[in-house]
Image (cartoon, helix red, strand yellow):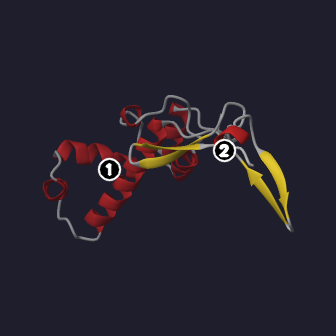
């Protein structure tokens, strides 16, 4: 008689031979967080890649919005920031703050998308970043630029 799966694999991953196949079992749980399914593994089995902090996810969403909204303005779909804000049912100043992110240097955008942005970088801090790309790079210490 086989033991229940949760008891057999509570200590860590196992490898079994099943005929011509190798079966690898890794103990894990699934949890819903913020509408997403997250895999929870026991201590010591954590992924070698660092998870993105919630700040980073918010920055990625804000970057996507900035570029989508800029495209809407440049294509003529929206005549102004005020019209865009009305359509989105948000305040005009919020749209303006988000649109600033469309002016970030491409390497800074890529660092944020990879999760390599400097620790503590937030949407609020990016509101104070200068428009010139060289000044943006010197304002924060981005990887490979310090």
The spot of residue 95 in percent (x, y) is 24, 48
Residue pictured at 34% horizontal, 61% vertical: 68
Q: Quadrant of the C terminus?
A: top right
Q: In the image as oriented, which residue stretches furthest toward the front?
A: 1
Residue pictured at 32% horizontal, 46% vertical: 98
Of residue 105 and residue 94, the one placed in the foreground of this image is 94
Label 2 crowd bin: few (<14), some (14–19), many (20+), radius 10 Å: few
Label of residue 60 in the image: none
Q: Is residue 117 left or right of residue 67?
A: right
Could you give the CA–CA distance between mark 2 and mark 1, rounded to whole angstroms? 54 Å
Q: Is residue 93 left or right of residue 17?
A: left
Residue 38 visible (yes or no)? yes
Residue 126 location, quadrant? top left
Residue 52 location, quadrant? top right
The spot of residue 13 in percent (x, y) is 76, 43
Label 2, secondary structure: give it: loop
Return the residue at label 1. 99
- When the figure is inspected, residue 25 is found, relative to residue 77, above or below; the finding is above
Q: Is residue 72 left or right of residue 51?
A: left
The spot of residue 123 in percent (x, y) is 39, 37
Residue pictured at 45% horizontal, 36% vertical: 55
Residue 104 visible (yes or no)? no
- When the figure is inspected, residue 144 is found, relative to residue 80, above or below; the finding is above
Mark 2 or mark 1, which has the lower sequence index? 2
Return the residue at label 2. 4
């Amino acid at each position: 008689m086989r033991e229940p799966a949760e008891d057999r694999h509570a200590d860590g991953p196992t490898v079994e031979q099943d005929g011509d196949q190798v079966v690898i079992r890794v103990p894990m749980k699934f949890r819903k967080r913020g509408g997403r399914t997250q895999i929870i593994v026991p201590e010591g089995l954590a992924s070698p890649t660092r998870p993105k902090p919630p700040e980073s996810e918010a920055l990625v969403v804000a970057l996507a919005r900035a570029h989508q909204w800029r495209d809407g303005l440049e294509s003529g779909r929206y005549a102004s920031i005020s019209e865009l804000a009305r359509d989105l049912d948000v305040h005009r100043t919020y749209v303006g703050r988000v649109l600033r992110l469309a002016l970030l240097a491409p390497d800074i955008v890529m660092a944020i998308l990879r999760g390599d942005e400097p620790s503590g970088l937030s949407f609020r801090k990016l509101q104070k970043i200068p428009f010139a790309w060289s000044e943006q790079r010197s304002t924060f210490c981005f990887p490979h630029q310090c």
